[in-house]
Amino acid sequence: MKLRERFIWMMTVSILLLVLLFGVFVPSACAGNSDIDSFYVRKLKSVLETLRKNYVDEEKIDEEVLINGAIEGMLSALDDPHTVYLNEKDMKEMRETSTGKFGGVGMIISQKDDFIVVVSPIEGSPAFRKGLQSGDMIISVEGESTKGITVEDAAKKLRGEPGTKVKIEFLRNNVKYEAELKRALIDVPTVRHTTIDDQYGYLRISQFAGTTAKNVKKVLREFKKNQVEGIVIDLRFNPGGLLEEVIDIVDFFQDEGIIVSTKGRDVSGNEVASATPFGTIVPKDIPVIVLIDNASASASEIFSGALKDHQRGILIGEKTYGKGSVQTIRIMGKDGFKFTIAKYYTPSDISIDGIGIEPHINVPEPELSDEENEILSQVFKDNIIDEFVEKNPQPTEKQKMNFIDKMIADGYKLPVRILRRLLRNALNISQNNNEIYDLDYDLQLQKAVEVLDKKLYHYQDGKYLIKE
C-alpha cells in the first residue's frame, strides 16, 4: 500500500480547542495477545478484585471507571503528549467537530512543564486577533489555575457558546498577561490567496484538511494562468493536518524525488511517498518562497522539508515546531485512544521530531525588552485598545495616529509598529475583517518580496540556492 493511501493523522502535538481532529477511526478491537494472562495483567486483575471486595466505600467501585482510569494511566506513563485516552465525550465531540466548525477561542494547545502551552493560534480566530503567540503559557482560565490539568480539560474550560467571553492569564517571556477572549464559531478557510503588486502569487495555507489539496490546485492553476513571477507559500501558524493532503500538494511543485517517509515498529508502516511527473503544476523556473515559524508543525514541516531538501524552495522565517510523529486512533466501543505509531523523515532521511526545520534566511520577530513586555502586559490588562475601537468603530487614519500618539504619551511606550498592529487586529475583529497579509507590519513577508524582487538566489536546473 502506498503511503499516500494510508489515511493517518499528521496532527500537531496537541488537541485543537474543542477537540478539532481529523483522522481515521480504526475499528474496535481488543488486540489478541498470546500472553494475555501475563504477570502484569494478573497483577491488574488482582488490584481490581481487591478493591471490589475490600474498598471501604463500595458505592465508588465502578469497574468501567476503574479500568478506564487504568488505561488512561497506562497511556500517560509513556510520557508522550500525542498518546492519550479519549473518553466517550471526547470521541463524541471529535466526531461533531471534525467538520472544521466549532465554538471556541481558536487555539491549538499542548502540555509543557505541567502547564498548557499555545502551539498555534488559528488564523482569523479570537486568539489570533488578540495577539496570542506560539509558546504562550496559559496559567489560568477564569481565575482557575491550569497547572497539572490535561489538554482535554483545558479545552473544555476554554470552549463555550459563541459570543460569550472567557478570561485567561498567560506567560510570555516570564511576564504575565491578562486577556479577555470573545468566543466565536471557528470556521476558517484552509486556503486563501491573492497577489502581491500584481507580480507574485501569495498562498496562505492555515492547515492541511480534507479539501486543501483540491483548493490549492485551483489557486496554483490561477497563478499559472496569470503568469506570476514567483509564489509565496505562507505556512506560519499552520499546525499540520492530513498526510495525504500535504503529499499531493508537494507533488504540485516537484516532478520527482522522495517527499516523505515513515518508520515505525510495524514494517508495513515503513513506506516512502515520492513525487510524480504527472501532478506538477508549478514550472521549475518559478521561484517559491516558504514562510515558516515556530508554530509551523507536522504536515507544514513535511512540505518545508521536502522543498528544502530538493532545493525547490527558499525557506524564510524562524525554525519550525518539530513535530515529526504519526498518530492513529483505536476505538474501544464508545471510547478509545490516540497513540503514536511512527515517525516521519524528510527526503534526506532526517527526523525533525523535537528539533524542527531551520529556514534558509532567519527573520525573527524582534524581541521586546523586559520593560516593553511589562508595558504590553499592561495594554492587555487595561483593555485600552478595545475601548477605543468600541467608541470609534470606523476611525480615520488621523484618529488612529492620534490615538497611538496619546498611548505613547500616556506611558504605553511600545514601537509604533506593534501598536499599529494591535489596533489593526482589534479593528478587524469589530469589522469582521480578516486581512490576508499586512506587508507594512510583516517583516518575514517583506523579506520574501525582497528576495524575489532582487533575485537573491542562484537558479540552475530547477534548484534554488541563496546567494551568499
Image (cartoon, grey):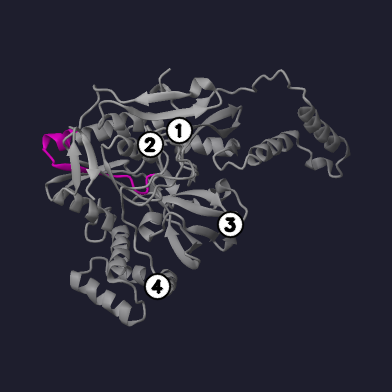
What's the CA distance linking mark 2 and mark 1?
8 Å
Instruction: State which tag comes first along the sequence, 2 or 1.
Output: 2
User: What label sits on residue 166 in the rendered view?
Assistant: none
Which residue in the structure is indicated by mark 2? 302
Instruction: State which tag comes first along the sequence, 1 or 3.
Output: 3
Q: Are marks 4 and 2 in contact (CB under 8 Å)?
A: no
Magenta-span inclusion, residue 232: yes
What's the CA distance linking mark 4 and mark 2?
36 Å
What's the CA distance linking mark 4 and mark 3?
26 Å
Comparing labels 2 and 3, the label whose residue is closer to the camera: 2
As shown in the figure, which amino acid type bears the numbered disc 3? Thr
Instruction: State which tag comes first along the sequence, 4 or 3.
Output: 3
> How far across and how far down the image is residue 52, in percent?
83, 35
Q: Residues within 10 Å of mark 1 (few under 14, many from 20)?
A: many
As shown in the figure, which amino acid type bears the numbered disc 2? Ile
Which residue in the structure is indicated by mark 1? 344
> How far across and how far down the image is residue 268, in percent?
50, 20
Instruction: State which tag comes first along the sequence, 4 or 1.
Output: 1
Which residue in the structure is indicated by mark 4? 372
Task: Determine whether the residue tagged by mark 4 lies in a helix, strand or loop.
Answer: helix
In front here: 372 or 305?
305
Magenta-span inclusion, residue 369: no
What is the quadrant of the N terminus in the image?
Answer: top left
Q: Quadrant of residue 289?
A: top left
As shown in the figure, which amino acid type bears the numbered disc 4? Glu
Q: Residue at x 40, y 47 (%)?
A: 320
Instruction: State which tag comes first along the sequence, 4 or 2.
Output: 2
Which residue in the structure is indicated by mark 3? 146
Per the rendered image, the range of residues in magenta is 221-238
Residue 196 visible to the viewer: no
